[in-house]
Image (cartoon, helix red, strand yellow):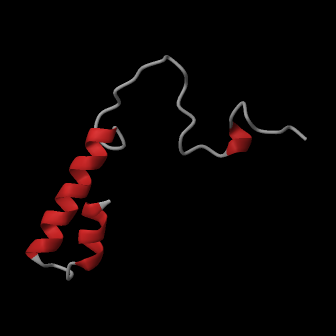
Amino acid sequence: MGARRAVRDAEDGSEAMKEARGRVHAAKVALGERGPVWWDDGAPDYNRKMVKNTPYGNDG
């Protein structure tokens, strides 16, 4: 959270902003939110699909 506060407090385009954004990116990669997929459960990926076009859709 400190990195996000640093982004909030830094001026746009400043060196402090670049450093803070780098810290946020590193944290997200470490948490698995960014970067290559680290799991493979064999399930189909329904990300970026309309719900009605997935098995979760309601046929009404």
- What residue sits 27% from the left and 43% below the top? 29
- What residue sits 33% from the left and 40% below the top? 31
Q: Quadrant of residue 4?
A: bottom left
- For residue 43, above or below residue 28: above
Question: How many numbered marks appear?
Answer: 0
Looking at the image, the residue that sits furthest to the left is 15
Q: Is residue 34 left or right of residue 6?
A: right
Instruction: Measuring from the top left, give residue 13's x and y in whole percent.
Output: 16, 78
Q: Is residue 9 left or right of residue 38?
A: left
- What residue sits 35% from the left and 30% below the top? 37
Instruction: Measuring from the top left, give residue 51's x and y in whole percent.
Output: 69, 43
- What residue sits 72% from the left and 30% below the top? 55
Looking at the image, the residue that sits furthest to the right is 60
Looking at the image, the residue that sits furthest to the bottom is 11
Instruction: Measuring from the top left, give residue 7's x and y in whole percent.
Output: 26, 71
Q: Quadrant of residue 57?
A: top right
- For residue 20, above or below residue 58: below
Q: In the rendered image, which quarter contains the N terminus?
A: bottom left
Q: Nearest the camera: 5 or 56?
A: 5
Instruction: Measuring from the top left, give residue 44's x and y in whole percent.
Output: 55, 25
Looking at the image, the residue that sits furthest to the front is 2
Q: In the rendered image, which quarter contains the C terminus?
A: top right
Q: Quadrant of residue 56?
A: top right
